[in-house]
Amino acid sequence: MSTLAGKHIVLGLSGGIAAFKSAELCRALVKAGVTVQVVMTEAAEQFMTAVTLQALSGRPVYTSQWDPREANNMAHINLSREADAIVVAPASADFMSKLLHGGADELLSLMCLARPLDKVPLIVAPAMNREMWSNPATQRNVAQLKADGIHVLDVGQGDQACGETGDGRMLEAEEILEDLEAFFSPKVLAGQQVLVTAGPTYEAIDPVRGITNLSSGKMGFAIARAARLAGADVTLVAGPVSLATPRGVKRVNVRSARDMLQAVQAHVPERGVFVATAAVADWRPANAADQKIKKDGSGQTPELSFVENPDILATVAQSAAAQKGDLFCVGFAAESHDLLAHATAKRARKQVPLLVGNIGPATFGQDDNALLLVDAHGARELPHTSKQALAVLLIQDIAQRLGGAQA
Ligand code: CTP
């Protein structure tokens, strides 16, 4: 479940063409279980009608500080006291400059100024032309807004409505949603470095053929995302899968088990967490051909022989950092039967403190799963639910173990 569910957010729109993305954002927030109260400046109404946002939020929109619907005629106080956060998207250059100076000549800025600083965070999503964004005045304002405790989201990069290309676009709705999700997530791994392997590996037979497996990478990607939401600095070493990189996660793409080992060794932290979810091919063809193997018409099939791949998890688990207890290693076991027995044996064999068992054929490619957490003391089940939810639970579990081990 989203950490946003049940929250009440005031969504403020200042004037900018990116306002069209705010309609999408409003919809996505409502879908995530947020109640959304929209407040618009007069400039915002040039780009988007209040009717649209009323329909999407299911609540009348506020556009004026003199709104007679408020019995005490203090919309700026009433609206800001109810909110779990105020999110201004788009935040125009002019609106940010107004925030900086404590300007309050219309409802949105007045409400931002009147918010209780200790209770109602203010999050702004800048949106403007690239020259306006890079102007020293704007950059100075951004730095000062941050220093004042306002959360300034990143800007996107790319084609702009004005026809120019560069930095300054407002983030897409789903990116803002993900940043809000991160904002509200408990930071149980703050300051930690986390390395995750995910997906299958691909072992070449020749330049056009190879051996791989049915791992989709979804569990590992969900774990990388959950670790980032929990405040960690996350690197994801991914085998060949076409999943989108979770926001805020560094991704290194690899193909074979040997590539994966190399990438892991280059990125494994001295202190932190290593989660090996990848379904690494156990063997690779002994002599991959440089050229495509052709049929010779005789009906003879090629002889394939195999050599064993390096065991990435076992290699990392035997490193000095892991042996000292500075690097907490988590293995996965994809089994087809006798999960507890195999997972227990695998934990001992790989010498990791925590091994997570799951039934491979039942979960490969699916969006949900069930996990069995096996440690030195026994086993605990995380029952069947979405991989995203399981990943959050697993990260919470790992954080608790770190609290004991690394505090
Ligand atoms: N693993 C790894 N490198 C390998 C094989 C496995 O890092 N060459 C990791 C996986 O990422 C997982 C754990 O080891 O975290 C167990 O993987 P699994 O394929 O279930 O186990 P195997 O060691 O291959 O054992 P078996 O094939 O006998 O089940």
Image: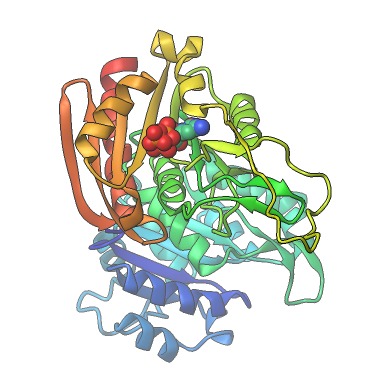
Percent position (x, y) of residue 263? Answer: 64, 32
Ligand 1's image quarter is top left
Can residue 405 be seen from the camera position used here?
yes
| Picture layout, residue 311 above or below residue 249 | above
Percent position (x, y) of residue 26? Answer: 41, 74
Side (left or right) of 355 relative to 247: left
The image quarter in which residue 310 lies: top right
Residue ID at (54%, 53%): 153
| Picture layout, residue 209 above or below residue 239 | below
Question: Front-most of 10 and 397?
Answer: 397
Percent position (x, y) of residue 335? Answer: 32, 43
| Picture layout, residue 142 above or below residue 38 | above
Question: Front-most of 400 and 209?
Answer: 209
Residue ID at (58%, 30%): 264
Can residue 407 be seen from the camera position used here?
no
Percent position (x, y) of residue 99? Answer: 53, 57
Q: Residue extending furthest front? A: 298
The image quarter in which residue 402 lies: top left
For the N terminus, which image quadrant? bottom left
Question: Front-most of 193 and 291?
Answer: 291
Side (left or right) of 285 relative to 40: right
What colour scheme does the image use?
rainbow
| Picture layout, residue 225 above or below residue 349 | below
For the C terminus, which image quadrant? top left
Residue ID at (35%, 21%): 349
